[in-house]
Amino acid sequence: MSIVRNNWTFDEIAAIYHKPLLDLIYEAATVHREHKNYAEVQISSLVNIKSGGCPEDCAYCPQAARYHTEIDVHALLKQEEVLATAKQAKEAGVSRMCLGAAWREVRDNRDFDRVLDMVRGINDIGMEVCCTLGMLTYEQAQRLAEAGLYAYNHNIDTSSEHYGEIITTRTIDDRLKTLDHVRKANLTICSGGIVGLGEKDSDRINMLLLLANLPKHPESVPINALVPVQGTPLENQPRVPFHDMVRMIATTRLVLPKSVVRLSAGRREMSMAEQALCFMAGANSIFAGDKLLTTDNPSFEEDMNMFELLGLTARKPFKDVITHNHSEHAQL
């Protein structure tokens, strides 16, 4: 039986990561099947509520104001538009709505007040709400929690050793400080990283080591494959080999056995067979819809056909987690 640990060493995770691939997938699948409903996959949808103009210099991101990319720049969307999208997504089987804004940090202003109204509205229709808004203070995390926020996404992206090669406008300690604020506000944490940033295997292992040794594991861990975007410093990065993605997902499942592992950006480039192997290795969440912030995602119809073929079912919202805000929704 898998045990949740917070005292992993680099060598222990490296030994898992470097196992022969079929052995690694088998072990991860075995751990995945220890838990009920291993064929249950959470479907999330992401709305880019404010696009472009970000002052950060993340080398992978087309929303940085300093890069010349062809993304559609727009100010904060109206609440009615966001709620209409959420209702449509819920009817299609989506259980979590993620709101993303291209901000460096949350500011206490009218835009933040509008986001809080969006959170309240989506929570009221019975969906989990996740926000990814940049860095925030404990007080701001509390306000989000009071509005009914379920999760906060704040990826650490890569290892602390490689971080400065990808981002110079903030530090990984800034990321960890926000995660600490989120946890203290009793919100669930969504935090993972990106594969394909020019990192070494040791960086991938160190990223997982950092997440695995947090005082409490993130409830959700996205594993993204870089989608190179023209105009960004990483525009010429080669596509991440599929075997690297499935290796990362399997290792994540073994090291963070009870976390939801999200097969996130880069899924568009995967065949159904490749995605099936990722689900077998422990992935149990996807983003559905045509866009994942600024890069293409498989269509919802394609995903539903895949679910039917593979025998996957959609996870219901608020499952197995009770926090001070959401006990009325929890399903045990």
Image (cartoon, helix red, strand yellow):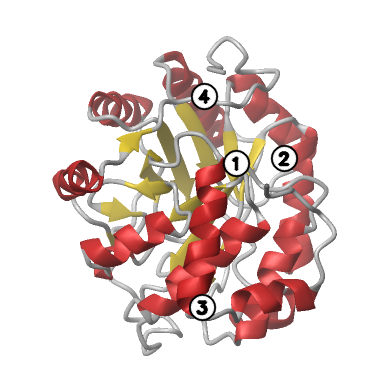
* Residue that mark 1 sits on: 152
- Of mark 3 and mark 4, the one earlier in the sequence is 3
Within 10 Å of disc 4 (Cα), the crowding (few <14, some 14-19, many 20+) is many
Q: Which residue is mark 2?
A: 182
Q: Earlier in the sequence, mark 1 or mark 3?
A: 3
Q: Is residue 96 above or below residue 146?
A: below
The answer, for residue 185, to whether it is visible in the render is yes
Is the residue under label 2 in contact with that under label 3 (CB below 8 Å)?
A: no
Quarter in which the C terminus is drawn:
top right
- Mark 3, Cα crowd under 10 Å, few <14 / some 14-19 / many 20+, is many
- Disc 3 secondary structure class: loop
Is 293 above or below relative to 249?
A: above
Residue 233 % position (x, y): 46, 85
Amino acid type indicated by mark 3? Ala
Tell me, for residue 318, which label it has, or none: 4
- Residue type of the residue flagged with mark 2: Val
Marks 1 and 3 sit apart, C-alpha to C-alpha, by: 22 Å
Q: Earlier in the sequence, mark 2 or mark 1?
A: 1
Image position, residue 179 (x, y; %): 73, 48
State the separation of the CA atoms marked 3 and 2: 25 Å
Amino acid type indicated by mark 4: Phe
